[in-house]
Each structure stands twice: as C-alpha cells, then as structure tokens.
Image (cartoon, rainbow, N blue to C red):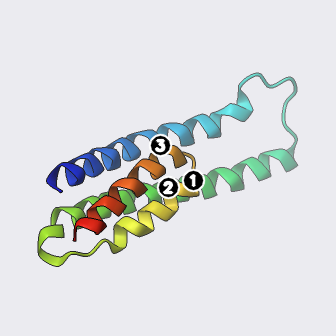
Amino acid sequence: MNDKIKYLKKSYILEMIIVPFVTLYILLSPFINVSSSPTSNEIGILLMSSIFLLLTTFVTVLIAYLAMNELSNYNENKKLVLNIINLIFILTGEVWLLGIFQAILLFLIYKEK
C-alpha cells in the first residue's frame, strides 16, 4: 500500500505542475495566430473566461496539495475525502487522463483498507 500512496503523491505533484501550464496554454492560445484584432466584446469574453480558468486552476492545485497532506496521514485516520474531491476536479478538467490513473490508485488503496 505504501507504494500506491507514493505513486499517488507523485501524480499529485505532476498535477500541480501540469495544470498551470495547460492553463497558460489555454489563456495564450487565442492570441497566437490571430488574423485580426479582437473586438471589445471578444476581449470581455476572454477576460471573464480567463478569470474563471485561473480561479479553477488555483482551486485545483490547492485541493491537490491538501489531498497530498491528507494522504500523508492516511495510516492514522483512513480518510480519503479530499482525494475524492480532487479526483472529481481532475476528471472534469484538463488532465482527465491523470485522473483515471489516480482513480485506479485510490480504488486499490481503498480496497486494501
């Protein structure tokens, strides 16, 4: 079980690295290869969506950090609440493939309980 927890912690670290880079790519992609300057309406839409995306990224990275701390104390309290919340964020977000890997590891850890 300790190996599974170690791999899950490494996947959380990977998540905390990948999610901000994917967010930056999504935020910068409308400005790459632009054929015309955006109108004021398009700038407003881009601004609102970028604020939402940055807030989502911040929450995702924060929950991954808290889930990793919860996993450190797993042997004492046997709770995976924040890990499951993090899994929901990842499966519905940009790096869902990493979420599938985390779901398999969480299932195996929970099954060994």
Name which of mark 3 and mark 1 comes first in the sequence. 3
Q: Position of residue 38 (x, y in %)?
A: 84, 36
> Horizontal and vertical percent for residue 105?
33, 54
Left/right placement of residue 56 relative to residue 27 reads left
Q: Is 22 above or below relative to 72?
A: above
**Marks 1 and 2 close (CB-CB < 8 Å):** yes
- Disc 3 versus disc 1: distance between alpha carbons? 12 Å
Say which residue appears at 42% left-offset and 62% top-offset: 86
Q: Name the disc covering residue 112, or none.
A: none
Q: Disc 3, disc 2: CB below 8 Å?
A: no
Q: Residue at x 78, y 52 (%)?
A: 45
Q: Which residue is mark 2?
A: 90
Choose between 111 and 28: the one closer to the eye: 111
Closer-to-camera residue (32/12): 12
Instruction: State the image quarter where residue 83 is shown.
Output: bottom left
Q: Secondary structure at mark 2?
A: helix
SS for dot 3: helix
Local crowd size for mark 1, using a 10 Å CA cut-off: few (<14), some (14–19), many (≥20):
some
Residue 93 is marked as: 1
Q: CA distance from mark 1 to mark 2?
A: 5 Å
Residue 20: give its label. 3
Answer with left or right where residue 69 lies relative to residue 43.
left
Amino acid type at circle 2 is Ile
Residue at mark 3 to residue at mark 2: CA–CA distance: 13 Å
- Tag 1: residue type? Gly
Residue 30, percent from left and from top: 73, 34
Q: Quadrant of the C terminus?
A: bottom left
